[in-house]
């Protein structure tokens, strides 16, 4: 089963994936789709408030984050990693449970990155916002870094996130019943 989605003028067929016995989601994966990544980055940048830096959670939003930075001429962007890396001199972390991740996930930010973010206006970027848990974790990391979140952007919003007015999105992605029909 698939769902045809119009994403800011580009059409894609999203496979429907089972989350539970009565809930399916449209799988939106930008990896490998250069046309979609470039297009969505350009469309989101048209809607972006003034900012100093872009930041995103690892991993599915990395192509979008990079492309938005490239198109805007940014020399730096930031990534919250899923685990500390050897090159990090210090980190702070937030735990998150998202709809597409099995189990609790951790997002970490390098202290050197946090120093650069301090006092700066940032936009949190993601591919899809569902429950809002990853977004909340990113907001917490930015708060700890003393950065000002001036925008929250995603290509798609689904579930309760689709009704939020504090997130800039290109399209709303419905949730699905097991037979592929859109949930009411």
Image: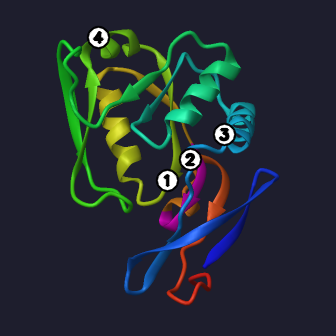
Residue 153 placement, left or right of 4: left
Real-space Cα separation, disc 1 to disc 4, in angstroms: 27 Å
Q: Are marks 1 and 2 in contact (CB under 8 Å)?
A: yes
Picture residue at 50% right of the left edge, 67% below the top? 159
Determine whether 140 is above or below 174 in the image: above
Foreground tag (4 vs 2):
4
Nearer to us: label 3 or label 1: 3
Q: In the rendered view, does 60 fall on the left or right side of 142?
A: right
Of the numbered discs 1 and 4, the one sitting upstream in the chain is: 4
Mark earlier in primary sequence (1, 2): 1
Q: Which residue is mark 4?
A: 112
Mark 3 vs mark 1: which is more N-terminal?
3
Q: Earlier in the sequence, mark 4 or mark 3?
A: 3
Please give the residue where the numbered disc 1 appears in the rendered image: 129
CB atoms at circles 1 and 4 under 8 Å apart?
no
Determine whether the residue tagged by mark 1 lies in a helix, strand or loop: strand
Label 4: state its secondary structure: helix
**Within 10 Å of the Cα at label 3, are there few (<14), some (14-19), or many (20+) other Cα atoms?**
many
List the single residue furthest toward the bottom. 179
Percent from the top left, x then y, of residue 77?
Answer: 49, 19
**Alpha carbon distance from label 3 to label 1:** 16 Å
Q: Which quadrant holds the C terminus?
A: bottom right
Question: Residue 159 lies in magenta, yes or no?
Answer: yes
Predominant SS of the magenta segment: strand
Q: Which residue is mark 3?
A: 37
Residue to which mark 2 is pinned = 167
Say whether disc 4 or disc 2 marks the residue closer to the N-terminus.
4
Spatial CA distance of label 4 from label 3 is 28 Å
Magenta residue span:
154-160
């Amino acid at each position: 089963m698939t769902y045809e989605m119009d994403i800011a003028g580009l059409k894609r067929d999203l496979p429907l994936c089972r989350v539970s016995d009565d809930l399916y989601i449209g799988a939106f994966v930008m990896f490998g789709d250069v046309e979609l990544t470039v297009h969505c980055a350009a469309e989101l940048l048209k809607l972006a408030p003034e900012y100093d830096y872009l930041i995103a959670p690892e991993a599915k939003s990395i192509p979008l984050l990079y492309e938005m930075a490239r198109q805007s001429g940014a020399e730096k962007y930031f990534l919250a990693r899923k685990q500390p890396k050897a090159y990090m001199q210090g980190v702070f972390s937030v735990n998150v449970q998202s709809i597409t991740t099995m189990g609790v996930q951790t997002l970490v930010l390098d202290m050197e990155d946090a120093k650069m973010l301090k006092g700066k206006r940032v936009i949190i970027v993601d591919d899809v916002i569902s429950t809002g848990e990853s977004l909340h974790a990113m907001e917490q990391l930015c708060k700890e870094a003393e950065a000002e979140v001036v925008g929250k952007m995603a290509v798609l919003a689904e579930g309760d996130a689709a009704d939020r007015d504090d997130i800039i999105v290109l399209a709303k992605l419905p949730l699905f019943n097991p037979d592929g029909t859109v949930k009411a």
